[in-house]
């Protein structure tokens, strides 16, 4: 099961986490092989710190955030005062996403896969790829103290996306783990 209790709720809004987002997330987003625009999905949006960074970095993005924690609704309704229709929040479990297949131009999970038990990582990645358009990018980055992925988990993520037919376009190994994986196929609307 996912971990969404006590410490983790505190951590999502804590100063070290916010400092990490400020330093690390723009760097990760800058490694995206494509220009990021259109319908973007963020998995596990927490307190919205990464969401704000995505919206500030990419002016042509409409961001949908999925978060299982009820308290995110309140945070996000405040953020919607700033970002209006560019930002939507959906309370849902990322293991079973409430979206049609091939709905999104980019799917991003930052500091979220580290939360997911190894036995459930495949469900999450398969769901992420189901709702992603063909030929589009899935971005994953983990690396705060709280979500540092084990070597085994990093290898598991790579193995699953390759098994699902993706091409790895960017991989950064080490304590901070990041990757961009391109879903196979070509979007029929292009
Ligand atoms: C460390 S936070 C990261 C938040 C945000 N991405 C950031 O970088 O600030 C991970 C979030 O994933 C959420 N989460 C964990 N398991 C989930 C699941 N199965 N479905 C939806 N959200 C989940 C947690 O509630 C938590 O808010």
Image (cartoon, helix red, strand yellow):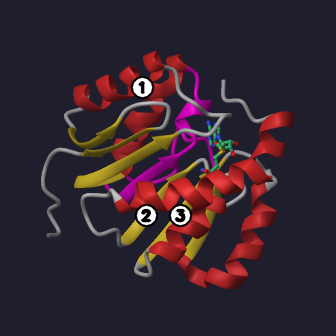
Q: Residue furthest right?
A: 6
Asked whether 53 falls inside the magenta stretch, the response is no
Above or below, comparing residue 112 to residue 32 in the picture: above
The dot on residue 154 is: 1
Q: CA distance from mark 3 to mark 1?
A: 25 Å
Percent position of residue 176, x then y = 48, 37
Observer-nearest of 177 and 80: 177
The 10 Å Cα crowd at callout 2, few under 14, some 14 to 19, many 20 or more, is many
Q: Relative to 64, is 177 on the left or the right?
A: left
Secondary structure found at label 1: helix
Q: Relative to 166, is 104 on the left or the right?
A: right
Res 37 → quadrant: bottom left
The disc, 1 or 2, on the residue closer to the chain's N-terminal end is 2
Residue 13 makes an appearance in the image: no
Residue position for label 2: 40
Observer-nearest of 33 and 117: 33
Magenta stretch: give its range. 92-117
Residue position for label 3: 64
Q: Quadrant of the C terminus?
A: bottom left
Percent position of residue 104, x then y = 37, 60
The disc, 3 or 1, on the residue closer to the chain's N-terminal end is 3
């Amino acid at each position: 099961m996912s971990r969404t209790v006590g410490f983790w709720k505190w951590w999502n809004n804590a100063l070290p986490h916010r400092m990490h987002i400020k330093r690390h997330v723009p760097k990760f987003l800058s490694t995206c092989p494509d220009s990021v625009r259109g319908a973007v999905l963020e998995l596990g949006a927490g307190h919205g710190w990464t969401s704000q960074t995505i919206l500030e970095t990419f002016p042509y993005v409409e961001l949908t955030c999925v978060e299982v924690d009820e308290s995110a609704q309140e945070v996000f309704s405040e953020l919607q005062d700033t970002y209006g229709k560019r930002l939507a929040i959906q309370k849902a479990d990322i293991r079973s996403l409430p979206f049609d297949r091939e709905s999104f131009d980019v799917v991003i999970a930052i500091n979220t896969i580290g939360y997911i038990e190894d036995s459930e990582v495949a469900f999450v990645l398969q769901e992420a790829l189901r709702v992603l358009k063909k030929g589009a990018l899935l971005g994953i980055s983990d690396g705060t103290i709280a979500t540092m992925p084990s070597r085994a988990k990093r290898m598991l993520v790579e193995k699953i996306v390759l098994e699902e037919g993706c091409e790895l376009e960017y991989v950064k190994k080490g304590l901070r783990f990041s990757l961009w994986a391109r879903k196979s196929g070509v979007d029929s609307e292009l």
